[in-house]
Amino acid sequence: MPGRVFLVGAGPGDPGLLTLRGKACLEQADLVLYDGLVNPLLLRHSHAKAQRTCRVGGPGERHLDQSEINRELIAAAKSGLTVVRLKGGDPFIFGRGSEEAAALAAEGIPFEVVPGITAATGAAVYAGISLTHRDHASAVAFITGHEDPTKPESAIDYEALARFPGTLVFYMGLHRLPQIAERLIAAGKPPSTPAAVVNRATTPRQRTVTATLSDLPDAVAAAKLSPPSLVIIGECVSVRGQAQWFEDRPLFGQVIGITRPEEQADSAIDRAVALGALPVVIPTIAIGPAPDLVAVDAVLDRLDQFEWLIFTSVNGVRGLLTRLWERGGDVRRLAHTKLAAIGPSTAAALVEFSLRCDVVPDEYRAEALAERLAPLVKDQRVLWARADRGRDVLPQCLAAAGAQLEQIVVYTNRDVAALPATELAMLERGEVDWIGLSSPSIARNLSTLLSPVARQQLGVRTRLCAISPVTAAAAEEAGLPIAVTAKDYTWNGMFAAMINSR
Ligand code: SAH
């Protein structure tokens, strides 16, 4: 099978601004080559090996040699791989994507190009600016600001741009902003024209500076903006306030450490992004398969004997029911079984298997679940699908209530050996505003994994939020100072607590 290449636009930063087609390409990729402007969170859509091909830095972006990238794309495709070349924004807008496509075509390698949301539209919308506001602009121009406008051989006609009846958007223009403004004004553009620079648009680090064209260079220098930034010049900037939304999000700009196991972090990551925050994944435990599948299978063979099935985690649900499915069974085996879940996430996992829960306590903890079950389980055969470690509250309480409890370990819960290096460095530099702790074992393990420097930031730059009083107590015992505890014992509850204490 010959390989092929998808040139995919990653959008301007917000991981939600990827097209459905782009996501489908990532899902089938064997190799992902992504450039420095791409949000690494997008790699969650792919199981492929991923490699960064250039970096953002200095004045303007320094790219790895383009011919090297082309050679790598060609070699990978020729070896039969499905390659995604993931590029910031739209691959054909100032991205050299068309050169990559031409190189592939010259080698006869099949390729497809997936457009993306380009920085201009992403930045404008997220800054509350309509580039073609009907009262202010009848056209919009995308211009490269990379060229030195004072050079006589500049390909950009500043006289024409000054007369242009609409909005001017400069890409890669930040480091030449003083010259660009000067040239436009010299060519007749009114110095009072409203203008904006949007830095790191569509990300939680977005910053927008507005000023008149003549004042913009000083305003930008005072704000110390860095690339990537986009320059927007035109009357449409004046009505920005009417349509502002993104920078007003409740956790805008906050960096939030998500301590959930990698494969379970998605919903918390998505929620953090939706609230305007920057999620940083720092798992402290890892989930593994059942240590003894023979034992799981033996229990599944007599599933019909149980009157109650109890789940205290999403992994418990998936561990047991996926195995049931793999062995040729399905939910009909549970036709006469009552189901209990510790909380809404666990109950939602049951819904994935088309199962409705009979009991979910109002308070999402083992004591509350045991209390709800106590009057229902006397002399009943009860099965608890659990992790290889955890609290023993349920067995004790259910035994006291007269239940015949069996426990089956359907997944393991292991401490990770170390925090990921990049994220640990962020913690040490005090760049993380919050860490959410969603279980006692996560809290205890974080405490052992933090370096002394990172620990010093706790309570200073980094605040800790506990999902419940049980987790808060475990954290405090492990020497972690808890700033707030969620009222609702879920990740949403933790986000609400963070919002309330801003
Ligand atoms: N193909 C990309 C542009 C590549 S050129 C696209 O369609 O968006 C790189 C320039 O894009 C940067 O110098 C900057 O001017 C702009 N840019 C890209 N992402 C940006 C972002 N998140 N915020 C502001 N400008 C951005």
Image: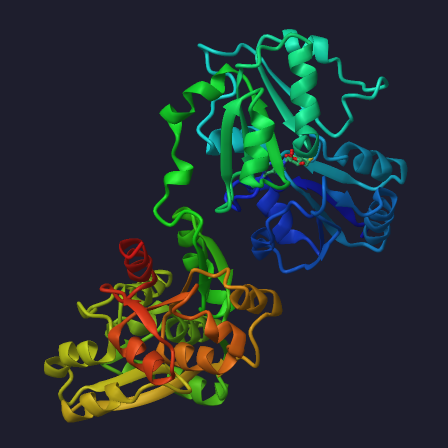
Q: Residue at x 41, y 66 (%)?
A: 460
Measured as percent of width and height from the top left, residue 5 is found at 75, 45
Q: Is residue 262 left or right of residue 85?
A: left
Measured as percent of width and height from the top left, residue 211 is found at 51, 25
Q: Where, by quadrant of the figure, is residue 302 drawn?
A: bottom left
Q: Is residue 90 left or right of residue 264?
A: right
Q: Looking at the image, can residue 183 be seen?
A: yes
Measured as percent of width and height from the top left, residue 431 is found at 50, 60
Q: Which quadrant of the frame does ligand 1 lie within?
A: top right
Q: Residue at x 75, y 51 (%)?
A: 53
Of 60 and 465, which appears nearest the observer?
A: 60
Q: Is residue 144 left or right of residue 375?
A: right
Q: Where, by quadrant of the figure, is residue 376 drawn?
A: bottom left
Q: Looking at the image, can residue 118 be seen?
A: no
Above/below status of 198 relative to 267: above
Q: Residue at x 53, y 14 (%)?
A: 192
Of 200 and 290, which appears nearest the observer?
A: 200
Q: Where, by quadrant of the figure, is residue 22 drawn?
A: top right
Measured as percent of width and height from the top left, residue 401 is found at 14, 89
Q: Is residue 175 left or right of residue 290?
A: right
Q: Residue at x 74, y 30 (%)?
A: 146
Q: Quadrant of the C terminus?
A: bottom left
How many dots with numbers?
0
Above/below status of 180 relative to 54: above
